[in-house]
Image (tube, helix red, strand yellow):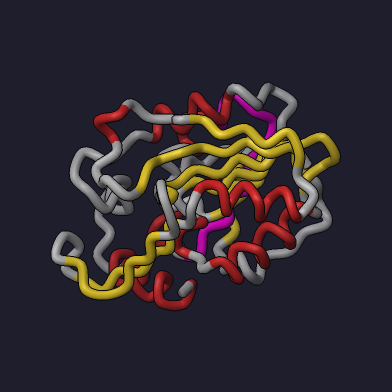
């Protein structure tokens, strides 16, 4: 699924013209709420590893409030919109291939995990937990299934392209993180009700301690 999703975003990257190009639905930029959520767990001493950073809609709102951000974004066509700052490092690489000896206080995955199937999600969580300092946090936000897993695979009229996503049931995502050793897992209804467009999925943010 990750390869198919990368193909989808590769086509978007080819025609990217502004910082909002990664937003797939009109009026769907809720990144001020995302930024505020992250800053509840961050301070001037925090080091953040952000996966799938896109055009920096979140990073550009929080980088002045933290010590360092490493932004892992596969497409340079997107990451060119990330602010140039001494405390931001951009790495253009697939998240499955990124590696570092550095430790971080926060790992952030916003609008990322639903582009991975369950097996891929477990692989990514397993890998990146080791990059978080003990007592640090993993913050995840995307749409999750309300009653069951919801998988979308095929042509999207809205996107005018083939679109792939797996919105796992929220309880399943919690169980995956718990099985990998995360604790004190908190689920937050991050957005106002009107931001949730579909009856079978819902936006949640998850905060899990490593």
Residue at image location 82% in from the left, 41% down from the top? 133
- Is 209 situated left or right of 142 in this image? right
Magenta residues span: 63-74
Res 179 → quadrant: bottom right
Does residue 83 belong to the magenta stretch?
A: no
User: What count of labels does the image hold?
Assistant: 0
Residue at image location 72% in from the left, 48% down from the top? 178
Q: Identify which residue, 184 or 79, lies in the foreground.
A: 184
- Is 169 situated left or right of 124 in this image? left
Res 151 → quadrant: bottom left
| Percent coordinates x, y for residue 19 in the rendering | 32, 46
Q: Is residue 134 above or below residue 157?
A: above
| Percent coordinates x, y for residue 85 in the rendering | 56, 38
Q: Is residue 106 above or below residue 16?
A: above
Residue at image location 83% in from the left, 56% down from the top? 101
- Is 65 situated left or right of 61 in this image? right
| Percent coordinates x, y for residue 2 in the rendering | 48, 72
Quarter of the picture holding the C terminus:
top right
């Amino acid at each position: 699924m990750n390869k198919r999703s990368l193909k989808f975003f590769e086509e978007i990257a080819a025609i990217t013209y502004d910082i909002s190009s990664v937003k797939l639905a009109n009026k769907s930029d809720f990144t001020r709420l995302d930024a505020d959520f992250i800053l509840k767990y961050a301070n001037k001493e925090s080091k953040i590893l952000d996966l799938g950073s896109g055009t920096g809609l979140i990073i550009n709102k929080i980088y002045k409030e933290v010590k360092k951000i490493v932004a892992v974004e596969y497409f340079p066509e997107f990451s060119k919109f990330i602010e140039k700052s001494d405390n931001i490092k951009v790495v253009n690489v697939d998240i499955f291939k990124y590696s570092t000896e550095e430790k971080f206080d926060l790992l952030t995955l916003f609008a990322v995990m639903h582009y991975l199937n369950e097996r891929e999600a477990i692989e990514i969580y397993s890998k990146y937990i080791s990059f978080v300092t003990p007592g640090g946090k993993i913050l995840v936000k995307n749409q999750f299934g309300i009653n069951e897993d919801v998988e979308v695979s095929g042509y999207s009229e809205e996107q005018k392209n083939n679109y792939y996503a797996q919105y796992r049931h929220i309880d399943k995502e919690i169980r995956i993180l718990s099985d990998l050793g995360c604790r004190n897992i908190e689920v937050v209804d991050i957005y106002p009700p009107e931001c949730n467009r579909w009856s079978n999925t819902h936006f949640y943010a998850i905060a899990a301690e490593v």
